Amino acid sequence: MDEGGMPLLPDSLVYQIFLSLGPADVLAAGLVCRQWQAVSRDEFLWREQFYRYYQVARDVPRHPAATSWYEEFQRLYDMVPCVEVQTLKEHTDQVLHLSFSHSGYHFASCSKDCTVKIWNNDLTISLLHSADMRPYNWSYTQFSQFNQDDSLLLASGVFLGPHNSSSGEIAVISLDSFALLSRVRNKPYDVFGCWLTETSLISGNLHRIGDITSCSVLWLNNAFQDVESENVNVVKRLFKIQNLNASTIRTVMVADCSRFDSPDLLLDAGDQAVLPCRVFDLGGDNEEEATDSSLCTPGPGRAKEGLRLMLDSVLDGHTQLSDCVLETRVAELLAQGRTKPPERSAADARNKYLIFTTGCLTYSPHQIGIKQILPHQMTTAGPVLGEGRGSDAFFDALDHVIDVHGHIIGMGLSPDNRYLYVNSRAWPPGSVVADPMQPPPIAEEIDLLVFDLKTMREVKRALRAHRAYTPNDECFFIFLDVSRDFVASGAEDRHGYIWDRHYDICLAKLRHEDVVNSVAFSPQEQELLLTASDDATIKAWRSPRTVRVFQTPRPRPRPFFSWFASHRR
């Protein structure tokens, strides 16, 4: 400005100059005079800075909840948990999983050192309790989950045994006394287990039928199994599902439909028409399917006739089939007419979805099965085990199947349970599974897919940045977590990753010395994230904003953008 206070340059020219500057330089220039300060806060200027700095696609609109581009830039820079504030070294071996209580006051960790540790989530995290599971013949602990009122902890582990053993167990621990309340067998161990209600949990069992054919049974168990009367159920069968081609059910979780109505606008942007159709409805709700449902589920008579014709063709030499293909064909025909179709009910907010990984082509988990759990199924009350059977329906059919055409290595639900995030390592395009024991090779790059459980549609292009390197037969689960605005995941490249759910951009890489197995946001404070690694540590990460808040008070706290200017990326 000149001596009279009049600007020497028009605002339009100052604006054009500021467009060529970076965010920190714009903020520094805004301190020169009132005119430059006003231009440095211009909304159009910060829109350009936002798209350029974060490299967001121009067709992605601003977050619906944002009030200005200036504040949105500040949110992504200042409120992402990317500052390491504490490293926990109490575990003596690889840390495999982390889970927060719903209140956010505590969290649990599982490790190859065969302990379940429960922590106080204070400003400085401290160890509250450690449970050693080796006296119960466990090899290691792998998963934990708090029940809805944070009074019980489910802990899942693997039994000692041969390398190819698949047996595991679920333990229920009281968070009042830390007493072990019950133990439930769980096979295969990577079913993990989960809570269905505050006092009942889901476990699995596996029954071999043939070389590559089996049956998975999912059980509902009472957490308190000290019932005196033998006529009171402590366990009830939920579902029995046929497995073909060496596949099994793994990684069960429950989505609560009553929470779907929570407003979630983060996934509305973008054109969904170009996304491939991965979700298949097996319920037969439409009229065309209903008019001739016998074609889909023939009765036992038609199934026996089909089996006879196929075997005659094989024995006469007209059809050449490998042992694996023959076993699968016979199993499919025998199951026809003995599979109970999905139970259809009016829309009920009390219903829940049971979600798990499965497959139909190979042992590699390449599909997600979805089975609706109705209100009357959410209790162990009913006929005593062994009664009420005799139905011709031996297996239960799935309601929906999501085929990801790749090896699934992680799943997580959004806070409102509406969106399912899936870590997958893709198969090569056009690959065909000729042998169920030899699945296709998998990509090193991990795709993070997003599915809307309300509409049963894929709703986002895959998020990418993280990588994994182990082959199919050694592949292990990498846990991810979702908060209101962010999604985070571990990876085998020694980093944890954080993406913004709306803009589809990677915001932070969190360094460890080995594979990052699990991540967990505080449910009450998404600016706090925990990561667990094979380096036997747990790291706590907070946002730059909260780090400044927790620092020693100063007479004049430094505002955000002065911090930004002194810490340029």
Image (tube, helix red, strand yellow):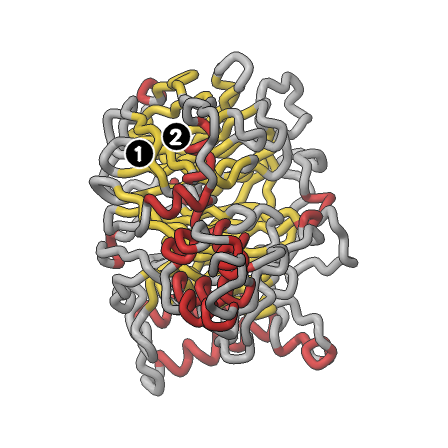
Q: Which amino acid does label 2 sit on?
A: Ser
Relative horizontal placement of residue 373, taking residue 465 as reference (left or right): right
* Residue 536: mark in rendering: none
* Front-most of residues 200 and 555: 555
Q: Name the residue furthest bottom.
A: 318
- Whether residue 381 sits left or right of residue 411 in the image: it is right
In this rendering, the answer to whether 400 lies above or below 507 is below
Give the residue at x 37% y 56%: 25
Q: Is residue 496 left or right of residue 225?
A: left
Q: Which residue extends farthest top?
A: 177
Identify the residue shown where x is 37% and y is 43%: 82
- Can you tell which mark lies on residue 95? 1
Is residue 82 visible in the rendered structure shown here?
A: yes
Q: Assess disc 2: are there few (<14), some (14-19) or many (≥20) residues with their C-alpha within 10 Å of its C-alpha.
A: many
Q: Residue furthest right?
A: 346
Which residue is drawn at the image coordinates 41% and 57% (left, top)?
26
- How far apart in space, not on screen, are marks 2 and 1 (Cα)? 7 Å
Q: Residues within 10 Å of mark 1 (few under 14, many from 20)?
A: many
- Residue 170 appears in the rendering: no
> Looking at the image, is 526 positioned above or below residue 16?
above
Residue at x-position 60% and y-position 66%: 268
Kind of residue at badge 1: Val
Residue 282, horizontal then vertical, whole percent: 60, 68
Q: Are marks 2 and 1 in contact (CB under 8 Å)?
A: yes
Residue at image mark 2: 109
Q: Tell me where residue 460 appears, x and y as whole percent.
A: 50, 67
Mark 2 or 1 closer to N-term?
1
